[in-house]
Amino acid sequence: MPEGPEVETVRRTLQPLLLGRRVGSVWLGTQKLRNVLVKQDFAVLVGQEIIHLGRHGKLLWLDFSRGARALIRLGMTGRLTVTSKQSAVEKHTHVRLALKDNDNELRYVDPRRFGEFFITDQSDRSSIDKMGPDPTTTWTAREQTQVAQSIKKSSRSIKEILLDQQVLAGVGNIYASESLFIAKISPFANGCSLSAAQINRLLSSIPQVLQAAIVNGGTSFSDYVDGNGKKGANIDFVQVFMRQGLPCPSCKNTIEKRTQGGRSTYFCCKCQG
DNA sequence: CGCACCCCCTGCCGGC
DNA sequence: TGCCGGCAGGGGGTGC
């Protein structure tokens, strides 16, 4: 479901509802997520206060007052929302953290179970350090040089490079197509074939596209909702994603859809020739 | 090491 | 109406 902007919107909407709250009780479903639900690990959360909500790329985490950290990946269909304890528990709910002295609980729902929700501690940076820089948090000259070098030395297509979270974190299938359109670069061009000028355009279009999506509350076309259960408005602002057959907003040529590395890519062959 | 390929899983939609 | 294939904001493992 979610790319960096959607996960950031979830983080921002959950923050006021969770920060400073203590966990009263924990409920876990029986089905495994990607990694397994390790039930005994969740027991440590009871009584701990949520002191911080962090994010890097598509990875979200909650930090607790006695050192625990819940690492959460939403996969394709994961939804993390705060709802009343009384509201009906929908199918595919895997985790419920009831808050103390409050009618609310945090729920993790994920039909396809491609997501993860597991407990570690705040000193464990392994998942975070595996990722490249996130263009919506820091995007220093040094980080941009590092990303540019990764692109320049790769023989993969630029679209596939952008989806690699180890190169940079937070871009997924929507924003890869969108960033390449803004930068006027063909998604099929190999990284090593790109000029310095093209790479520079891309390094500036990526944070631009991601920041705009955050302002609009993320892109919802199917499952994605924020921490309050509300859809994002950014689908109304995308230029090429899911717009095959429609005129290119720049040149009026027909937008195309093609499969690339098993995923759909949307582009204008005239603007991105 | 990089890179093609395949898998994980449910739901929905269109075609027959 | 039902069945089947294809497809969906992700990511990891395998084998060459």
Image (cartoon, coloured by chain):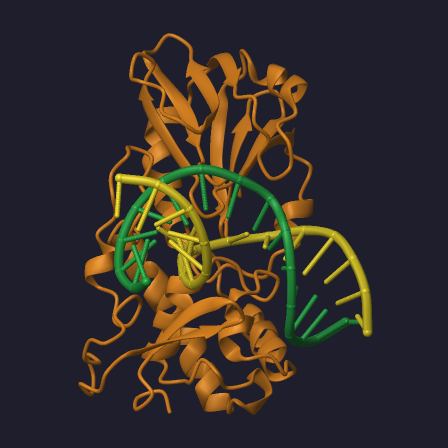
Chain colours: A orange, B green, C yellow
Task: State the residue at coordinates (37%, 53%).
Answer: A5
Q: Position of residue A246 (x, y in %)?
A: 20, 76
Instruction: Determine if residue A166 is in view.
Output: yes
Q: Image height check: is C4 above or below A45?
A: below
Q: Image height check: is C7 above or below A91?
A: below
Residue sitting nearer the eye, A93 or A125: A93
Task: State the residue at coordinates (40%, 39%).
Answer: A11
Is A149 on the left-hand or right-hand side of A238?
right
- Residue A223 quadrant: top left
Q: Where is residue C11 in the image (x, y as percent from the top left)?
A: 59, 52
Q: Image height check: is A61 above or below A68?
A: below
Q: Where is residue A42 in the image (x, y as percent from the top left)?
A: 60, 20
Task: State the residue at coordinates (57%, 73%).
Answer: A147
Is A256 on the left-hand or right-hand side of A148?
left
Is A234 on the left-hand or right-hand side of A169?
left
Residue sitting nearer the eye, A151 or A88: A88
Instruction: Determine if residue A141 is in view.
Output: no
Task: State the residue at coordinates (41%, 85%).
Answer: A185
Q: Where is residue A143 in the image (x, y as percent from the top left)?
A: 56, 68
Image quarter in which the C terminus of chain A is found:
bottom left
Q: Image height check: is A241 above or below A81?
A: below
- Residue A229 quadrant: top left
